[in-house]
Image (cartoon, grey):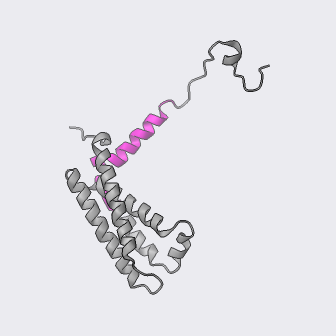
Amino acid sequence: MQPIGMTEERCTGKPVHHSPSPFPAAHGIVWFMIKQLLLTSSHAKLRYWTAIFLYLLILVFGSIPGARADIGEVAPGIILHSIAYAGLTFLLFTGGTGGLPQRAGKAVLTIAAMGALDELVQSFLPYRHGAVSDWLVDCNAAVLTALFMWALWTRFRIQPST
């Protein structure tokens, strides 16, 4: 019997060989699949239109009376805006076309327009209010995400096969 905290290797001084993992390549396969889905040009249109669809969901669900108050219990508005618009920026950047400056510029300008429209819609609802500060949070999230993606894009992007 081994003392508590002592492994067989520590007690005997002989290395213990463990059986190999039943899924040794699982990590590599999952990483490959994520890269294929998020970083290849073959799914760019899907990412772009997913961003548009998610934005429309933001507009619709944000217009439901009481929905903002309910989600506000989970996280403050600055966090919600930052996460939502950073995610949309990621999808627009990776789903866009052109070089890195064009992708970043189009993503940031699109998010600026989306955020402005979101705040405009809110200003027409009696139970909501549009705020320039929310729009600025949206724009800052877009700029920071676009810069981050620009820095990482050349390192991790999978080049199209010829």
Nearest the eye: 50 or 117 = 117
User: Taking the image as drawn, is residue 91 in sight?
Assistant: no
* Quadrant in which the N terminus is drawn: top right
- The region drawn magenta spans 24-50
Q: Quadrant of residue 105?
A: bottom left
Q: Residue at x 48, y 35 (%)?
A: 26
Q: Is residue 66 above or below residue 108?
A: below
Q: Is residue 32 magenta?
A: yes
Horizontally, is 61 left or right of 13 in the view? left
Q: Position of residue 103 (x, y in %)?
A: 24, 55
Q: Quadrant of residue 87?
A: bottom left
User: Taking the image as drawn, is residue 110 in sight?
Assistant: yes
Nearest the eye: 39 or 29 = 39
- From the image, give the main secondary structure of the stretch colored magenta: helix
Nearest the eye: 83 or 53 = 83
Horizontally, is 9 left or right of 109 in the view? right
Horizontally, is 67 left or right of 57 in the view? right
Q: Residue at x 43, y 36 (%)?
A: 29
Q: Position of residue 33 (x, y in %)?
A: 40, 42
Q: Residue at x 37, y 80 (%)?
A: 121
Q: Residue at x 20, y 37 (%)?
A: 162
Q: Position of residue 9 (x, y in %)?
A: 66, 17
Looking at the image, the residue that sits furthest to the bottom is 126
